[in-house]
Amino acid sequence: MSEKVLNKILEDKIIAIVRGIPSSQIAGLAQALNKGGIHCIEITFDQSAPEKLEETLKSIRTVKELFGGEILAGAGTVMSSEQVELAAEAGAEYTISPNVNESVIRKTKELGLVSIPGAMTPSEAAQAYEWGADIVKIFPAGNLGPSYIKAIKAPLKHIPLTAVGGVNVENCVEFIKAGCCGVACGGNLVSAKLINEGRFDEITELAKAYVKALRSEV
């Protein structure tokens, strides 16, 4: 299963980051992204509010129940092996973290999920990959820039990297050109304002713009 999920993530080149969006709005958002050609959604845990943990799990379950054949649901900001287990039980097919945590990576792989930990330095990226990461998320990519990606890819050609943080429709292709296998986008794509106002058609158009830009590099 994990190989099939990994191949789809690599094929699509983009993951939508859903942060702080109520589970009651997740179906409309997922549908809007799907219509726009984005089929990988990361639904994040809020580490500052443990009481919202169930909200994240509910959103993952909703996406799996309604769009299981079309959308890959992942859990984001996963920072403990316990959260990996909860995400897997809810139906998550991959985990994404802001950091490199051996227990999170190993538990993710043990449960047959795709592992995407977050790193900033070459040392962190290499360690994550050694522990079993499938893709290493370079974060915050927007601050570091495509030139940083290009520099660390020179010695780390064997490690698939994805760019996260500050990625937008104007610069997403630059990260691919620099050597990334994909990108992940949060607020620049999943706008809380548009969601709250029910303007899902505009999110669909944003998704189409990202997909068009990224496909220009295929």
Image: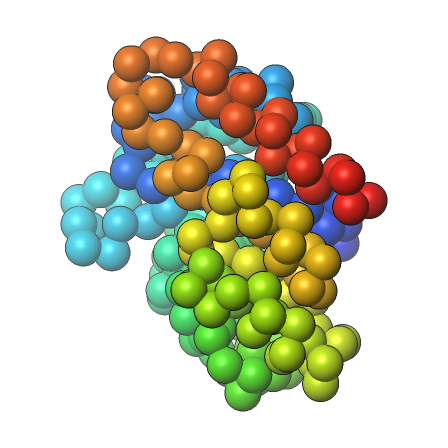
In the rendered image, the vertical position of residue 179 relative to residue 184, given as above or below:
below
Query: Residue sitting at 68 percent across and 76 percent down?
Result: 153
Residue 62 at what x, y percent from top left?
45, 26
In x, y percent, where is residue 176? 68, 55
Compared with residue 171, is residue 34 higher up or lower down, i.e. above or below? Answer: above
Quadrant containing the C terminus in the rendered view? top right
Q: Quadrant of residue 3?
A: bottom right
Residue 34, given in percent of the width and then of the height, sits at 60, 23
- 60 or 163: nearer the viewer: 163
In screen coordinates, is 96 left or right of 47? right
Colour mode of the rendering: rainbow
| Residue under the point 77% across and 39% down | 216
Residue at 66 percent of width and 72 percent of height: 150
- Residue 178 at x, y percent in the picture: 68, 64
How many circles with numbers are drawn on the protein?
0
Residue 132 in sight: no
Is residue 143 at least partly visible in the picture? Answer: yes
Q: Quadrant of residue 81?
A: bottom left
Quadrant in the rendering for residue 179: bottom right
Q: Where 126 falls versus 191 (above or below)?
A: below
Apparent side of residue 193 relative to residue 116 in the rendered image (left or right): left
